[in-house]
Image (cartoon, rainbow, N blue to C red):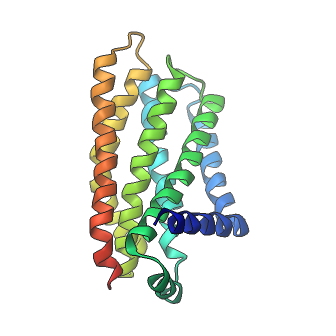
Amino acid sequence: MFTRSLALVKKDILLEWRQQHTLYGILLYITATIFVLFLTVSEPEASTWNGLFWVIQLFVCVNAVAKSFLQEGSGRMLYYYTIVTPTEFILSKLVYNVLLMLVMSLLSLLLFTIFLSNPLNDTLLFAGIVVLGGTGISMVFTVLAAIAAKARQNAALIAIMGFPIILPQLLLLIRLSKLAFAEVFRPGAAAELVGLVAGLDVLIVLMALVLFPYLWKE
């Protein structure tokens, strides 16, 4: 199962490399957005810096993840139906979108620290939260993109379903990220919030594995 899933991940990476205009478009979106923020507020307060970062990650994820199912035509999906199981297919999409989102999130963090200063007291902690949060956000929108693709209303359904679902997780990530700005680190609070975010990520994976086979049959 994992061999075929990895083969699909390699296929998506190869397609992304061949169609570089899509990747460059996302990179341009990140750079331009952060540069506009630099021109507007060159040194924002810590809370503003934190909120802006996660809001940008949300929109970056929508642009990066939604296309993973848009580029799969009906003929290609029928071909996948004959060679892989739904579990293998959705696992490959989850892995690929997580890898893509992690690259974009870490790049955003680098550009934020370059253009908008660095108010973090613990950069490594914040980077770990970015990895954990980017993973969860990308998986949520991967599942939503799969549902929207089957309904043939991709952009509309992702926007309608995505933001109400992702809002609690986004608020939790913003709250967790505040620990990286605090001068006094509280390990107990950090462990509790990290466990909650990690549990949500695991729950999303299980939900995808259970629900996607029903979509696959359509």
Give the answer, above or below, for where 95 lies relative to 179.
below
Q: Nearer the viewer, residue 99 or 33?
A: 99
Residue 134 location (% of width, % of height): 46, 45
104 vs 46, left or right, is: right
Give the answer, above or below, for where 110 lies relative to 138.
above
Residue 212 location (% of width, % of height): 32, 71
Give the answer, above or below, for where 81 lies relative to 57.
below
152 vs 126, left or right, is: left
Q: Residue at x 65, y 60 (%)?
A: 23
The residue lying furthest to the top in this view is: 184
Q: Residue at x 44, y 50 (%)?
A: 58
Q: Residue at x 44, y 20 (%)?
A: 181
Numbered label tally: 0
Give the answer, above or below, for where 8 lies relative to 120.
below
Q: Quadrant of the C terminus?
A: bottom left
Q: Residue at x 62, y 69 (%)?
A: 11
9 vs 91, left or right, is: right
171 vs 126, left or right, is: left
Q: Quadrant of the N terminus?
A: bottom left
